[in-house]
Amino acid sequence: MSPAPHPKSDVWPFIPSPRIIDVVKAEGVWLEMANGTRILDAAGGAIAASIGHGRKEVAAAMAEAVGDTGYIVPTFLTPQRERLVARLKASWLPDHLTRVHLSSGGSEAADAAIRLARMYQIAIGQDTRWKIIGRVPSYHGATALTLAAGGHTARQKGFEPYAPHFPKVPAPYALRSPLGRNHPDEDIRCAKALEDTILSEGPETVAAFLAESITGSSGGAQEPGPRYWPEVQRICQQYGVLLIIDEVMTGFGRTGARFGIEHFDVRPDIMYAGKGLTAGYAPLAGIYASDEVLAPLAERGDSLMFYTYGGHPGACAAADKALEIMEREDLVARAATQGRKLEALLRDRLGQHPHVAEIRGRGLLWGIELVADRETLALYPAEAGITNAVVGQGLARGAFFYPGGTGDIRDIICLGPAFTISDDELEMLVERLAGAIDAATQKAA
Ligand code: PLP
């Protein structure tokens, strides 16, 4: 993303593109610009808009909530929040995650989850446990603490003085495993790296391990092999390390299950998720924890934290309505079925492309990894800016693709359209993506 001045606006950042993207209306998977041109939103914004744009029902629910109660301090109860929490517990959250705290977005939720882990360790007398072990690649948010715990090298640059040095372990990345391309033991290698790191740091210093169930845009929809999560769970339990799972991008149906963790055998102590919670209609995220994690805090009378806009009635009403729509229209199952169709189209059109190293994903979260050389997996030089070039070429063809990767891990194009996307729209999406990749890679040749 370029910080250079925008020809038409003082607001930043913006997507570098041959055109100015000024959206005045959105419906379904389509964005409409001021001049009437339409863009297929292949990314649901920032992989958030899961029920499609322009749902008047959600707008009406938000208007009613704000009309009835406006803003209420988050320590008071409101019917909108109570209804949302009841729905989350009845239909969405894993049974053991019974406690809900609401923040305004994913970064705040990640920050809160980290602080919750630390507060838990203090409350049980483990004051020396402060480190959060994170993974590379990963992304957990834009605050100093979440940047420090995450593995997004490009975004961390320059902010190191503000952030504690948290240890990092590799996230499973089978394509580029040091054991060999697509080596079956990549999952075990990475789980072992966690155990080695806990031991070398000293278990008595480690509060939690933080990871996405399936790495989102930073790694391009990478999921671990089958032995990874059970082994990580065992390691965390053995050393008294809490397991925090980030479901910001993968949560609320995106991967064809309610949460990414449902694809694996894993039981987080703390989980947090935003984005799809309101399907992008309002800023809201939740931190979900077990009774065991909250009980010691309650005994000490610790209150978790306070955000002025956490659990805003308008945002809670948006989330409650968005989830109701997902249930009514069976959209989680639809993410799975449309995802299978998208996969077939992608493999057919791009599977043998000379600059596509891998197409990976689940449900409606996909990553396409681009390389200079498909055989050696050689990267394009950073200066080639292939990811941004594909995004720009996509916009010129009337489609928005999400730029992924972390700077060191590049070049990755992410897809995350609304679950309501039709078969015709999926075909259009893949056609436009292939055109954009062809154009950008031919220019770089
Ligand atoms: N965690 C993951 C996996 C994300 O993808 C993001 C945002 O993209 C965040 C956390 C931060 O969420 P937000 O941008 O809502 O602060």
Image: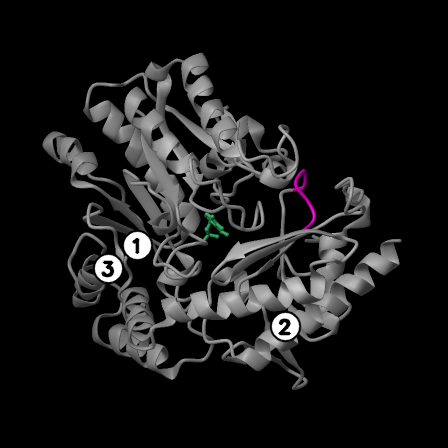
The image shows residue 202, relative to residue 271, as above or below, that is above
Q: Residue furthest bottom?
A: 36
**Amino acid type of the residue that numbered disc 3 sits on in the rendered structure:** Leu
Q: Position of residue 99 (x, y in %)?
A: 20, 47
Q: Are marks 2 and 3 in contact (CB under 8 Å)?
A: no
Q: Secondary structure at mark 2?
A: helix
Q: Depth-wise, is mark 1 or mark 3 nearer the camera?
A: 3
Is 262 in front, or is 30? Answer: 262
Q: Which residue is mark 3?
A: 88
- The picture places residue 61, in percent across and down from the top left corner, at 29, 77
Is ligand 1 closer than 8 angstroms to the Cβ of mark 2?
A: no
Is residue 277 one of those drawn in magenta?
no
- Residue 409 in the magenta stretch? The answer is yes
Which residue bears the numbered disc 1? Answer: 310
Q: Is residue 16 at least partly visible in the picture? A: no
**Foreground of the two, 35 or 180:** 180
Residue 115, quarter of picture: top left
- How much space separates mark 2 and mark 3, taking CA atoms? 32 Å
Using a 10 Å C-alpha cutoff, classify the residue at mark 3 as few (fewer than 14 neighbours), some (14 to 19) or many (20 or more): some
Q: Main secondary structure of the magenta part?
A: loop
In percent of width and height, residue 96 lies at 20, 45
- Amino acid bearing label 2: Leu
SS at circle 3: helix
Q: Which region shows up in magenta?
A: 407-412
Q: Which residue is mark 2?
A: 429
User: Which of marks 2 and 1 precedes in the sequence?
Assistant: 1
Left or right: where 17 falls relative to 404? right
**Mark 1–mark 2 distance (CA, rounded to whole Å):** 36 Å
In the rendered image, the residue lying farthest to the left is: 299
Q: Amino acid at mark 1?
A: Gly
